[in-house]
Image: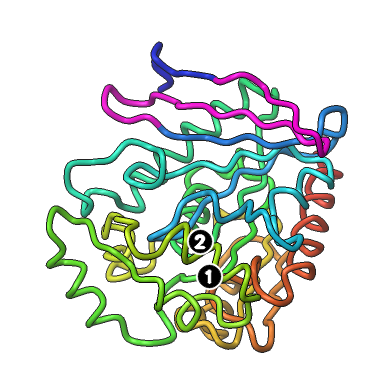
């Protein structure tokens, strides 16, 4: 529930034609969610898009200001008002006392609160949800619980019921992290997550998320409790999944199992070659942008 101390910033109109607005949405006495809206004024004919980030990251990764890899910019050019927000414990949203308390369940709550805010801003009763990595656990759970609010799902680097490699060592380290927060290192980024990204895009991720970025481990521990959807047959919206063959987490078999379990027959899986866990910033990012915009267009036409 949005509380009185929500702080909505001014609309800023950029020289390149985009507008942005930052908000701290207070949903609990000690929880503010950071939301960054971006859109092109007068071009908002399509459904709004809400973006759900991965573990050890925040929403800034959807708007990398380099080499046309900004998914947010592509969606805004296509006619959507975008809402990229940080789950509690991440980025500029409120920290929680113990990072293990950040779960799929709390992130579903966060997302539903943001959907209420989106409805207030745009009047739209439903949105397209874009999730990546941990966000792919959260987005289907939202669509399952309140299917009438989700017009379409985009899942980048899908993790559903299993991971492509065992995570036992990673999960044990996460359980031992002091206060439930851990640190990544810049050396981990290229090899594990974005093997086909350009050096400039890799450097941006290293600078933003590497070295000194403390993240809550709860989202990693969520991988020990898969799957997080209990009644996937309730998901009846169009679904796009994009995965890469170099992804250590997403697998073809897991994606096939998920798509076979949902209620909709409007599904599409793009399996990219030579791409890792974050396909929207890697070498075939333009293809991902085009596919996501196609889904948004199809969902918008039905509303």
Mark 2 vs 1, N-terminal side: 2
Is 274 above or below relative to 255?
below
Left or right: 146 in relation to 110:
right
Label 1 secondary element: loop
> Viewer-proximal residue, 124 or 30?
30
State the quadrant of the C terminus. top right
> Would you say the residues marked 2 and 1 are in contact, meaning their CB atoms lie under 8 Å apart?
yes
Residue occupying the point 12% across, 67% down = 176
Where does residue 248 sit, x and y in percent of width and height? 46, 83
Is 223 above or below relative to 236?
below
Left or right: 92 in relation to 53:
left
Residue numbers of the magenta segment: 9-32
Where does residue 83 sit, x and y in percent of width and height? 61, 39
Is 179 above or below relative to 43?
below
Where does residue 159 sit, x and y in percent of width and height? 47, 71
Residue occupying the point 39% across, 16% down = 3
Residues under labels 2 and 1: Cα distance?
5 Å
* Residue identified by numbered label 1: 158
> Viewer-proximal residue, 25 or 141?
25
Where does residue 140 sit, x and y in percent of width and height? 52, 56
Residue occupying the point 61% across, 49% down = 129
**Residue 230 in view in this figure:** no
* Residue identified by numbered label 2: 136
User: Is 12 covered by the magenta stretch?
Assistant: yes
State the quadrant of the N terminus. top left
The colour style of the image is: rainbow
Left or right: 215 in relation to 25:
left
In the rendered image, which quarter is residue 283 located in? Answer: bottom right
């Amino acid at each position: 529930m949005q509380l009185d101390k929500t702080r909505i910033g001014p609309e800023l109109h950029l020289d390149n034609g985009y507008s942005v607005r930052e908000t701290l949405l207070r949903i609990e006495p000690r929880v503010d969610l950071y939301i960054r809206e971006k859109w092109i004024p007068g071009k908002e004919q399509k459904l709004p898009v809400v973006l759900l980030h991965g573990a050890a990251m925040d929403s800034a990764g959807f708007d990398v200001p380099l080499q046309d890899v900004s998914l947010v910019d592509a969606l805004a050019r296509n006619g959507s008002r975008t809402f990229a927000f940080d789950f509690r414990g991440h980025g500029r949203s409120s920290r929680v006392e113990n990072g293990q308390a950040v779960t799929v369940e709390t992130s579903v709550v966060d997302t539903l609160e943001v959907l209420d805010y989106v409805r207030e801003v745009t009047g739209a009763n439903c949105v397209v949800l874009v999730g990546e990595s941990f966000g792919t656990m959260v987005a289907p759970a939202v669509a399952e619980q309140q299917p009438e609010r989700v017009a379409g799902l985009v899942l980048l680097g899908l993790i559903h019921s299993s991971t492509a490699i065992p995570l036992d060592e990673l999960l044990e380290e996460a359980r031992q992290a002091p206060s439930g927060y851990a640190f990544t290192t810049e050396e981990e980024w290229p090899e594990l997550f974005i093997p086909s990204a350009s050096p400039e895009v890799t450097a941006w991720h290293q600078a933003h998320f590497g070295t000194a970025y403390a993240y809550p481990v709860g989202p990693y521990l969520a991988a020990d409790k898969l799957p997080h959807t209990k009644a996937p047959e309730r998901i009846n919206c169009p679904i796009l999944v994009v995965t890469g063959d170099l992804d250590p987490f997403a697998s073809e078999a897991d994606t096939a199992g998920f798509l076979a379990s949902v209620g909709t027959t409007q599904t599409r899986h793009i399996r990219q070659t030579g791409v890792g866990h974050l396909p929207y910033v890697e070498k075939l990012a333009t293809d991902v942008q085009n596919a996501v915009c196609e889904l948004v267009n199809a969902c918008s036409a039905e509303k």
